[in-house]
Image (tube, rainbow, N blue to C red):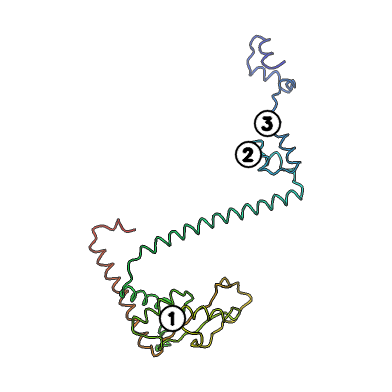
Amino acid sequence: MSRAQIAEAMGGVSNKMLTKWLKGIPPPEWTKRPRAKDHLRERAVAMRLEGGSYQEIKEVIGVSKGTLSLWLGDLALPEERRLEIGERRVVANQRRAAAVRSQRIRRAEAIVRKSRSDVPAVDDAALFVAGVVAYWAEGAKAKPWRSGASVIFTNSDPDLIVLFLRWLQMLGIGLERVTFRLCIHESADEVAALDHWSKVVDAPVDVFLRTTFKRHNPKTVRKNVGEAYHGCLAVRVRRSTDLNRQIEGWWKGIVEGIARDVSSAVSSSPSRSGIV
């Protein structure tokens, strides 16, 4: 009999008393409730033995992967099936990564397109400041141990090289005072690089000075390789020691002007809460 039947037959004995009396006596088999998911587990085991993946079994049975892991943890897939699933997972991950990368590239391109339209017309004043800043960041400067430095601007970005040449033109310095020298790794394609820079600066290759090569180090894992790598171009201005000193003065003037403007803006502002 079940506990309920015993309690009824004995006139409503309390549950606590029944527990005390029936201690150590197992309930009859017919009173045991079958587990609700036993049939699902049996089906999951059968599918696993047939080579089903957790994802495939989950889609059919509708239980979580955590439950499947408890049920099927000791059932290994056949090697061939395991490799097949692994290859599919790799392909899926690659496709997902490619989609994310493509989305990121499209978003970046959209931001760049919009930002280009934000720039006002570049007049001589803007070009002058841009050229001074670019040179002070990338150009050769006087040092305590080398006070008579020439103006030499070296960069791998064609747009910066064009900016610097346009800036020199604005200063009245023609190409007759300018020399070009390619600086590149010895393992790269010198001929292709010279042709590239020749088109950038609109000057024939034969006016370039002898190329400077950087010795290849096999232990270094370089990222700047392939057809897109053209090395750096060094643009030097002849008889330019005084120009280098002028650039230093211009740079200091720009910095001091910015400092004055910032100080004035802060002192005249009633609150700094709006500064981001």
Q: Amino acid at mark 2?
A: Ser
Residue type for callout 3: Lys
Label 3, secondary structure: give it. loop
- In the picture, the disc for residue 183 is none
Is residue 149 something that shows in the picture? no
- Give coordinates of residue 62: x percent, y percent: 64, 36
Residue 30 quadrant: top right
Q: Measured from the top left, where is residue 31 in percent x and y?
A: 71, 20
Q: CA distance from mark 2 to mark 3?
A: 12 Å
Query: Would you say 272 lies left or right of 102 here?
Result: left
Mark 2: which secondary structure?
A: loop
Asked whether disc 1 touches disc 2, contact meaning CB atoms under 8 Å apart, the reply is no
- Horizontal side of 34 relative to 199 (left or right) equals right
- Of callouts 2 and 3, which one flags the residue occurring earlier in the amino acid sequence? 3
For disc 3, the marked residue is 37
Q: Position of residue 202 (x, y in %)?
A: 45, 81
Quadrant of the rendering where the N terminus is positioned: top right
Dot 1: element: strand
Residue neighbourhood size for the residue with mark 1, other residues' Cα within 10 Å, grouped as few (<14), some (14–19), many (≥20): many
Q: Give the residue at mark 1.
A: 153
Tell which circle, 3 or 1, labels the residue nearer the N-terminal end: 3
Q: Is residue 117 visible?
A: yes
Nearer to us of marks 3 and 1 is: 1
Q: Nearer the viewer, mark 1 or mark 2?
A: 1
Residues under labels 3 and 1: Cα distance?
75 Å
**Circle 2 sits on which residue?**
64
- Label whose residue precedes the other's in the sequence (1 or 2): 2
* Picture layout, residue 50 above or below residue 198: above
